[in-house]
Amino acid sequence: MTVRNRRVSVRIVTTVEFHTLPEAHVDRALDHAHLVFHETPEEKTRKQHRDLLLRCERIGAYEGDRLVGLAAALPFQLSVPGGELPVAGLTFVSVAPTHRRRGVLTGLLDESARRCAVNGQPLSVLWASEAAIYGRFGFGPATGAYSVEIDSTRPLDLRLAPDERPLRLVAPDEAPALLAAAHSAQRAVRAGRIARDEHWWREEVLREEDEDYKELSPPRVVVLGGDEVPPGGGAPRPSGYAVYRTRGGNEELRTSGLVQVTELEADTPAVAASLWRYLVSIDLTGQVRAPGRPLDDPLLLFAADRDQVRVTDQSPALWLRLTDPATALTARSWAAPVDVVLEVTDVRLPANAGRFRLTAGPAGATYRPTSDAAELALDIRELGACYLGGAELTRMVLAGLVTEHSPGAAARLDAALRTTYLPHATDGF
Ligand SMILES: CC(=O)SCCNC(=O)CCNC(=O)[C@H](O)C(C)(C)COP(=O)(O)OP(=O)(O)OC[C@H]1O[C@@H](n2cnc3c(N)ncnc32)[C@H](O)[C@@H]1OP(=O)(O)O
């Protein structure tokens, strides 16, 4: 591919080629990525990054022998409404500062989309470093998250009775085996979550030392229940758990004690209430911080005092791109019947553009080209944002991003896309 520097008056034409980055170039790729992301990781963290990159499909952008860009994709199974799909989880996306704004990222993402087709991945997902980057490439924000802070200088004020079964702390070593079934049960009801393997539990969720949490303790794991068969049957598993790290208060240094919650999952609101009550009650701490909470977290409704439990931030979380809309749309479940003609634009993957009739319902779906009149006109990025059930087309019509040619079409499609729980992504990569 030939890319041209558009920002200088003298036209410099350079040739950048995109091909698989071999294992022998992984250390170069890490040097490149750390330079671009302004990181100087300790050896342990570098090894973690190396291990992660080795697990990825890797695309290098080469100018001659020089590596000037990188994109990597982790092969995941992502929960979608009613099931799961293979996805490319994009990460390490980086372009050398000497080569920015010449189309290198564009080339990397085009190549990545081609590989999704080869690998049978109808979706591509990522966590964006900046919200402005990925919309133009057809990605839409498909899940969102709240950051929550709780004043834990006093007991948690609750509007419901917590589950009073005992809580127990378990060693992080034992946790993956114990928590995996509880996590799978949550994935089955919440779209947007990746399937974790043992490696992911140990290296990502329960990593002992984490440069992001340098002043905090290693992860602690608390569980509720586990000896009884869960509602709906199956093997005994915990009804809920929390993973958190702590820092004790220090009067001399004037630091207040903190509980940082990295994950909290519960089968019922009463189980969630018990876990939150516990986290708020930990001695020598005065604040609970929980970033990355789902937008429909029941805590925000059953907390009696919303001055005690405050949302401090809201942000997009997982960005999603439909690389193969027909496969993706026909693979998910639908909450209500809908029959609607969509006029879809897709600048980067023109094969996805055109007019399609989506006929979907609880029994399944079809998505086929049609010459019938369009009822909704939208870009692939809006379809991606709505795919997991986390965004509403009716709001996008009001915002002028989706055109409704047939009154009520957006509301009908929203009703079909709806899920009981909002999608929620927990694992950054
Ligand atoms: C999933 C992840 O890994 S997220 C991490 C993303 N990486 C980073 O943030 C690291 C630092 N930044 C970079 O490495 C690069 O600047 C990148 C990857 C963001 C962009 O790479 P580039 O090769 O410069 O992008 P490219 O030239 O293909 O740009 C394509 C278009 O996107 C636009 N664009 C690129 N980056 C940005 C940005 N950060 N904000 C807004 N627009 C952007 C360009 O202006 C261009 O628009 P145009 O076609 O209208 O001219």
Image: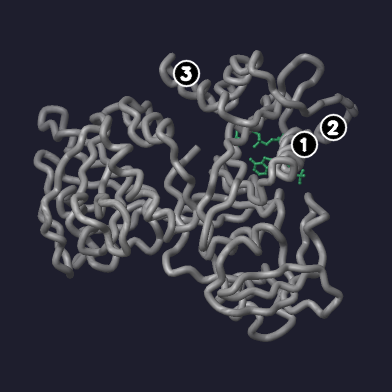
Task: Give the side of residue 311 with respect to residue 168, left or right.
Answer: right
The label nearer to you, 3 versus 2, is 3
In percent of width and height, residue 289 lies at: 28, 46
Coloration mode: one colour
The answer for how far apart the CA atoms under marks 3 and 1 are is: 28 Å
User: Residue 191 shows which numbered tag?
Assistant: none
Query: Can you say whether 61 is above or below 190 in the image?
Result: above
Which residue is at 19% across, 67% downward? 304
In percent of width and height, residue 126 lies at: 57, 44
Q: Mark 1 highlights which residue?
A: 107
**Circle 1 SS class:** helix
Q: On the rendered image, what quadrant is the N terminus found in?
A: top right
Task: Give the side of residue 51 with respect to residue 399, left or right.
Answer: left
Mark 1 vs ligand 1: CB below 8 Å: yes
Label 3 CA crowd tier, 10 Å (few <14, some 14–19, many 20+)? few
Q: Which amino acid does label 2 sit on?
A: Val
Q: Are marks 1 and 2 in contact (CB under 8 Å)?
A: yes
The answer for how far apart the CA atoms under marks 3 and 2 are is: 33 Å
Quadrant in which residue 394 is drawn = bottom right
Specify which label sits upstream in the sequence, 3 or 1.
Answer: 3
User: Residue 47 shows which numbered tag?
Assistant: 3
Query: Can you say whether 429 is above or below 53 in the image?
Result: below
Quadrant in which residue 130 is drawn = top right
The label nearer to you, 3 versus 1, is 3
Q: Mark 2 highlights which residue?
A: 3
Which residue is at 56% across, 55% downward? 141
Mark 2 vs ligand 1: CB below 8 Å: yes
Residue 228 can be seen, yes or no: yes
Residue 394 can be seen, yes or no: no
Q: What residue type is labelled 1?
A: Gly
**Circle 2 SS class:** strand
Quadrant of ligand 1 in image: top right
